[in-house]
């Protein structure tokens, strides 16, 4: 989809976190796919960044797309949420992201202004904040 949309995806250096590699990869994949699906007609740019704050990493997946109306931001992580702009979406990707991030002890939310894009944030505990035998599975 990145090539199809002639998109640019900029990724800064990311930390190593404790958790299920496949599931956390699915979160990033779903967020990037969501950004590309709602990018509008211009070739999109997606930026993935991270900041460390208060024993957690705060990841950001930002796009320069059409943005999300405030009225949809409250329910966007509910299952089967989709809109007419979705090219091939099923309406489950963001719900899956929320479940995975929550299972890993984090939070997920969106900030957006229609017409200027959206930024999806999610937090994960830094590795030194994870207790042995926790809910994490890194098999």
Image (spheres, rainbow, N blue to C red):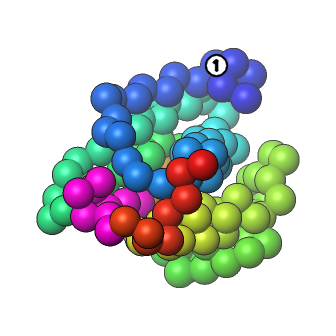
Residue 54 in the image: state x and y as whole percent: 15, 65
Q: Residue at x 44, y 69 (%)?
A: 133
Q: Crowding at label 1, few (<14), some or many (≥20) Cα neighbours within 10 Å?
A: few
Magenta includes 103? no
- Residue 22 makes an appearance in the image: yes
Residue 44 in the image: state x and y as whole percent: 55, 31
Residue 7 in the image: state x and y as whole percent: 59, 24
Q: Residue at x 40, y 38 (%)?
A: 48
Q: Quadrant of the N terminus?
A: top right
Q: Residue at x 60, y 49 (%)?
A: 139
Residue 86 located left or right of residue 115: right
In the rendered image of this protein, does residue 110 appear above or below residue 118? Answer: below
In the rendered image of this protein, does residue 41 appear above or below residue 66? Answer: above
In the rendered image of this protein, does residue 73 appear above or below residue 61? Answer: below
- Residue 31 makes an appearance in the image: no
Residue 50 occupies quadrant: top left
Residue 104 located left or right of residue 81: left
User: In the image as oriented, which residue stretches furthest toward the left?
Assistant: 54
Q: Disc count in the image?
A: 1
Q: Residue at x 66, y 25 (%)?
A: 2
Residue 23 in the image: state x and y as whole percent: 61, 52
Determine the secondary structure under disc 1. Answer: loop
Residue 78 occupies quadrant: bottom right
Residue 62 occupies quadrant: top left
Q: Which residues are magenta?
A: 121-131
Residue corresponding to mark 1: 6
User: In the image as oriented, which residue stretches furthest toward the front?
Assistant: 133
Residue 84 located left or right of residue 98: right
């Amino acid at each position: 989809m990145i090539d199809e949309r002639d998109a640019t995806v900029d990724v800064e250096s990311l930390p190593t976190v404790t958790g299920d590699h496949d599931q956390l990869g699915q979160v990033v994949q779903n967020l990037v796919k969501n950004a590309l699906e709602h990018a509008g007609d211009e070739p999109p740019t997606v930026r993935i960044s991270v900041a460390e704050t208060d024993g957690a990493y705060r990841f950001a997946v930002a796009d320069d797309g059409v943005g999300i109306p405030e009225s949809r931001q409250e329910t966007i992580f509910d299952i089967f949420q989709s809109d007419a702009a979705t090219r091939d979406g099923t309406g489950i990707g963001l719900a899956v992201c929320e479940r995975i991030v929550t299972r890993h002890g984090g939070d997920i939310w969106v900030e957006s202004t229609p017409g200027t894009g959206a930024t999806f944030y999610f937090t994960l505990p830094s590795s030194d904040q994870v207790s042995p035998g926790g809910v994490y599975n890194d098999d």
